Amino acid sequence: MSETRIIISGGGTGGHIFPALSIAQSIQKIMPEAKFLFVGAEGRMEMQRVPAAGFEIKGLPVAGLQRSLTVENLKLPFKVIKSVEMARSILREFKPDVAVGVGGYASAPMLWAASHMGIPTLIQEQNSFAGLTNRILGRRARKICVAYEGMEKFFPASRILLTGNPVRDNIARPTEAQREEGYAHFGLEAGRKTILVTGGSLGSATLNASVRRWAKERAAEAGCQVLWQCGKNYFAKLASPEEATGGAANVHLVPFIDRMDLAFAVADVIISRAGAGTISELCIVGKPVIFVPSPNVTEDHQTHNARALADKDAALMISDAEAPEKVMAMAEELLADEARCEQMTANILPLARPDAGYVIAREVLKLVNK
């Protein structure tokens, strides 16, 4: 029997790349001899992250539609046509048994080409509100793996499987030993109540403004400490960390957190954007969380993601517009209410699906066997 060959396409943000890598790594554990080719968008972070994880990747010139009228938008149809032709060429050369799409720019031309060439396709839809691209691709996909209930309104019910979103290998319910290690790793005061603020791998202007305001107006008298991931671009523009924190000793500013497992371990309350991958990790971590959905995403899917948890009292949610003035006060109030924190933890933990990567991997291999 010839070796199994699998294409995985998508990317653009960590929220797409981490699930893609998790699926590939899970398949490798089941079938070590499987051959992989990733397909991403030229110039996006997957072009670095995927090779760093030990996989080959090829780039397509596809890009997203800009929100304002620009020359780049006029080039978009030509980029799409070129990307579909390149995708066909890649498929003819690599000869995959199955193509997997995880969302992001490159997913559309690759899965469209694969499905029209008779190659079985699987979509991993991470959000509770499916984007237009995946809704179109879902018409021809053999299997659609989803993370939320009620996705029948977007996809054929017979092909949907509720799997959850794959997460990074080191994400698990934190231990007390990790908590102690985390205090030392980040230079935090051991045992002091801690708020973790993270806007994802790229950072968040709204969350940065929220902490900056709190640091200067309230930090000195607060009984807690803050671990604040601000994003590399924001950090690079600062004259110094003290400029953002106002010199507050209990505000620890970092551009990027490389050990998210330890950051989750020290956190008593987490303030976060509501990307699908982040939510899946936070369900496993089981800490009280306040979501500030980004309004700058397709079809406002982060609000839909966050509301799915808020409606179950598994998280709190505040709008992007209200956050700079109110979110840090909400976090302090939540920190002081231990009963509420315990209840939120009890409500969020059952939503976790830590084996999502393996479940999806098995579905991919079923398509190969067919």
Image (spheres, helix red, strand yellow):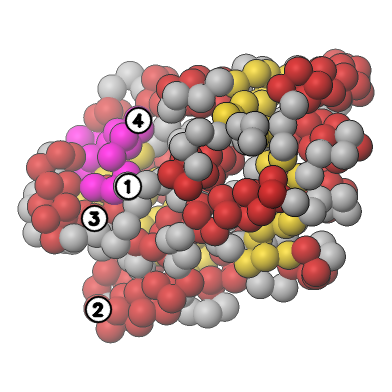
Depth check: 214 or 150 in front?
150
- Which amino acid type is marked by label 1? Asn
Q: Which mark is residue 291?
A: none
- Which amino acid type is marked by label 2? Glu
Q: Which residue does the numbered mark 4 point to in the structure image?
A: 255
Q: Secondary structure at mark 1?
A: loop
Residue 127 percent across, percent down from the top left? 65, 56
Q: Residue at x 35, y 32 (%)?
A: 256
Q: Which residue does the numbered mark 2 point to in the structure image?
A: 338
Find the magenta span and give its range.
244-262
Binning the other alpha carbons within 10 Å of mark 3 as few (below 14), some (14 to 19) or many (20 upward) gives many
Which numbered disc, 1 or 2, marks the residue closer to the eye? 1
Placement of 304 over or under 181, stated as above or below: below
Which numbered disc, 1 or 4, marks the residue closer to the eye? 1
326 part of magenta stretch = no
Q: Secondary structure at mark 4?
A: loop
Q: Which residue does the numbered mark 3 point to in the structure image?
A: 265
Q: Earlier in the sequence, mark 1 or mark 4?
A: 1
Gap in angstroms between the C-alphas marked 1 and 2: 27 Å
Q: Is residue 224 left or right of residue 141?
A: left
- Which amino acid type is marked by label 4? Pro
Q: Secondary structure at mark 3?
A: helix
Q: Is residue 80 left or right of residue 300?
A: right
Depth check: 241 or 28 in front?
28
Q: Earlier in the sequence, mark 2 or mark 4?
A: 4
Residue 119 percent across, percent down from the top left? 81, 39
The N terminus: image quadrant: top right
